[in-house]
Image (spheres, grey):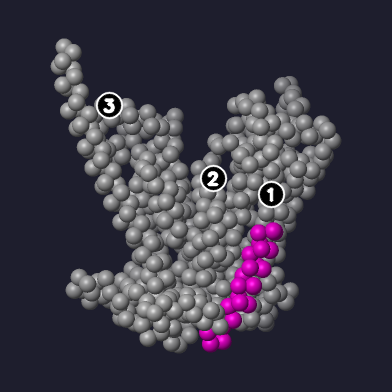
């Protein structure tokens, strides 16, 4: 009996070893193929951005000599002034971050922790606004800002952020609900008011969710094209996105410079993503899977 | 649900203790939401709700920013937009009553029908393609392999780059004579098409372009796959079910709530695509990529047809609403929720 068992065991483990390795190889091949497809456009872009002008249309992908000058050159090509556009985009993004973090946190806390008549109805209304397509409100909001004389200022692109964003409110509320109430109750007994509870007790606890909101807000504001296109007509007020579009629309696009400019426009997002990847993914997963 | 306390907190120990002491009763999100918080017990006799002193005021103060924003930037504009759709207005002169003209005008507007056709065609291809690819990628990325997080980063990267730079990059890749895509095709002896300037092929180019950035759907699928209990797979494996069988009989049915969520999200987004077409083609050639929103933008801000644009926006809203409702209504047929059995089992 014992002998038979032993002889059986050896080929079995050998057999189970083989398909597993094969499976791994196939999986890695599939993953590698996908990764190539996902990365190659970016690599191609990088290579083009380093080429001298006369090599851009040459099928040889490698730049020779490597021309780093394309990067500073692309910033001031023709009438473009990207330094200015980066300042504009940066200012708009920072104001959106401040506005949405301040307001959405407080609103989300209210919906998560405080009770009042009408709360459930208001929360349903909040969720319903998530479904509303932006074009439905686009024209009257433009008319309003136009009437206020806010066209060609950053106000239409920043002020609304201070009134909270339904998606962020929902995301933060979901997170508040996972935190036990004991700490707040204790603080309340000690005489803390709601403001103190939010900023002194809750804020440290929900920092991961705030980070998720922050990175998603950064991404959306930085990438936004429609809103700046509606409100910013003056070239000195352009955002980076608008500058790129203007560059692309110029008659004879210098692809090497355009790629350098595009890559630089992507850089802040790429850097943020590599540093705070966890929060991008959490933000999306959190909003997607709870209730 | 994950522990919300991040490890870098100095007070985290104390907090964790209170958390574990509080146990499970605090985890029920919905129950928490519908019951009152605080430590005064609910009276079992009377159903009247009690509020802490100042709680009602605190609630309304907290949500005041959103409430104001809702009135100024959503409710008000929605109301005016609906009203405007019955007027002709150029933002300057006083609006003129137009009755249903803006709506009937759509029926004869060839550009409008082009926009509808383009948007539906795009959605008909992009929505299923993106979901199948995202799910396949998510299954790959859910494998327990060394270095899988690096792959996850790579697969998700394009999704955060969505925007003008993303589109400009793809315009260069699609460049007919020197772009990467036609270069690769030429290695196989194929003559690549003039992607973005050929009316027959431009929309296909935009679909391919958009598929590069489907990371959000993918991440939601990865999260959904994580929630599928391993023991079901193990049990099926012991019973001799192969990986393909297990995918279609276990993974897919249990993933239907995630698929449902993704579908609603992607459909809402797809009907409102703008940047891709606006930057890559401007709606051309010959209206071949005239996305609904590109046409709406043109009407609203180039032709100054505020009334007509508003009417178009309401039609879009109605279409999105109908599609969402259709998916929700159909969900009882194909979405599987825990604790609820389908007839066929």
Residue drawn where x is 61% and y is 41% of the image: B6
Q: Is residue A89 magenta?
A: yes
Residue A284 in sight from this viewpoint: no
Residue corresponding to mark 3: B238
Relative side of A108 to B176, left or right = right
Q: Going by the image, does A42 lie left or right of A155?
A: left
Q: Earlier in the sequence, mark 1 or mark 2?
A: 1
**Disc 1: which residue:** A105
Q: Position of residue B269 (x, y in %)?
A: 48, 59
- At mark 3, the secondary structure is helix
What secondary structure is found at the residue carrying circle 1? Answer: helix
Can residue A79 be seen at all in this image of the molecule?
A: yes
Q: Are marks 2 and 3 on the same chain?
A: no
Percent coordinates x, y for residue B24 in the rendering: 60, 26
Packing grade of label 2 (10 A; few <14, some 14-19, many >=20) is: many
**Residue tagged by mark 2?**
A286
Nearer to the camera, A164 or A83: A83
Q: Considering depth in this image, is A109 or B84 the residue closer to the camera?
A: A109
Categorize mark 3 by other alpha carbons within 10 Å: few (<14), some (14-19), many (20+): few
- Where is residue B208 shown, x and y percent of the image? 35, 65
What chain letter is assigned to the residue under label 2? A
Q: Height in image: A161 above or below B113?
A: above
Instruction: Tell me which segment is drawn in magenta.
Output: A77-99
The chain under label 1 reads A
| B71 and A236: which is toward the camera | A236
| Furthest residue toward top | A1
Report the residue at 67% width, 81% height from top: B92
């Amino acid at each position: 009996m014992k002998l038979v068992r032993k002889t059986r065991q050896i080929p079995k483990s050998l057999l189970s070893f083989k398909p597993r390795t094969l499976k791994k190889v196939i999986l890695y091949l599939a993953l590698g193929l996908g990764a190539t497809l996902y990365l190659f456009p970016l690599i191609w872009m990088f290579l083009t951005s380093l080429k001298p002008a006369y090599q851009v249309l040459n099928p040889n992908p490698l730049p020779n000599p490597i021309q780093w000058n394309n990067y500073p050159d692309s910033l001031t090509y023709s009438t473009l002034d990207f330094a200015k556009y980066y300042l504009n985009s940066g200012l708009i993004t920072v104001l959106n971050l401040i506005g949405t973090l301040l307001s959405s946190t407080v609103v989300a806390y209210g919906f998560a922790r405080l009770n009042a008549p009408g709360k459930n109805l208001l929360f349903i209304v909040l969720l319903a606004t998530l479904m509303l397509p932006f074009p439905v409100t686009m024209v009257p909001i433009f008319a309003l800002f136009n009437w206020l004389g806010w066209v060609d200022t950053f106000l239409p692109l920043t002020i609304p952020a201070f009134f909270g964003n339904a998606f962020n409110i929902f995301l933060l509320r979901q997170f508040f609900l996972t935190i036990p109430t004991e700490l707040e109750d204790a603080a309340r007994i000690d005489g803390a008011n709601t403001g103190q509870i939010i900023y002194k007790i809750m804020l440290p606890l929900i920092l991961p969710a705030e980070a998720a909101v922050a990175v998603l807000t950064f991404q959306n504001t930085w990438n936004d094209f429609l809103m700046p296109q509606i409100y910013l007509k003056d070239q000195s007020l352009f955002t980076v996105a608008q500058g790129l579009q203007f560059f692309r629309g110029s008659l004879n696009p210098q692809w090497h410079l355009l790629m350098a400019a595009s890559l630089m426009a992507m850089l802040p997002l790429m850097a943020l993503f590599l540093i705070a990847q966890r929060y991008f993914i959490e933000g999306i997963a959190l909003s997607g899977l709870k209730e | 649900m994950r522990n919300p306390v991040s490890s870098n907190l100095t007070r985290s120990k104390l907090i964790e203790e209170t958390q574990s002491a509080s146990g499970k009763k605090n985890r029920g999100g919905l129950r928490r939401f519908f019951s009152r918080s605080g430590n005064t017990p609910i009276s079992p006799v009377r159903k009247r709700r009690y509020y802490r002193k100042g709680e009602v005021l605190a609630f309304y103060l907290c949500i005041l920013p959103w409430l104001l924003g809702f009135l100024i930037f959503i409710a008000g504009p929605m109301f005016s937009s609906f009203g405007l759709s019955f007027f002709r207005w150029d933002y300057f002169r006083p609006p003129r009553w137009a009755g249903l003209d803006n709506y009937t005008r759509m029926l004869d507007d060839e550009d409008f029908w082009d926009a509808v056709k383009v948007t539906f065609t795009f959605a008909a291809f992009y929505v299923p393609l993106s979901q199948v690819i995202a799910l396949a990628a998510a299954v790959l990325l859910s494998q327990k392999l060394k270095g899988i997080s690096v792959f996850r980063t790579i697969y998700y990267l394009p999704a955060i780059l969505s925007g003008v730079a993303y589109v400009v990059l793809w315009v260069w890749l699609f460049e007919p004579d020197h772009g990467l895509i036609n270069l690769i095709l030429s290695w196989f002896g194929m003559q690549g098409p003039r992607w973005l300037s050929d009316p027959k092929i431009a929309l296909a180019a935009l679909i391919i372009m958009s598929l590069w950035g489907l990371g959000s759907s993918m991440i939601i699928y990865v999260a959904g796959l994580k929630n599928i209990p391993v023991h079901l797979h193990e049990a099926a494996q012991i019973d001799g079910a192969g990986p393909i069988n297990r995918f279609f009989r276990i993974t897919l049915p249990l993933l239907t709530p995630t698929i449902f969520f993704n579908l609603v999200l992607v459909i809402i987004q797809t009907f409102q695509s703008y940047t891709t077409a606006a930057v890559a083609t401007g709606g051309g050639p010959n209206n071949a990529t005239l996305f609904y929103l590109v046409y709406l933008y043109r009407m609203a801000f180039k032709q100054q047809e505020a009334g007509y644009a508003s009417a178009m926006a309401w039609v879009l809203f109605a279409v999105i609403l109908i599609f969402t409702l259709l998916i929700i209504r159909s969900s009882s047929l194909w979405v599987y929720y825990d604790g609820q059995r389908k007839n066929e089992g």
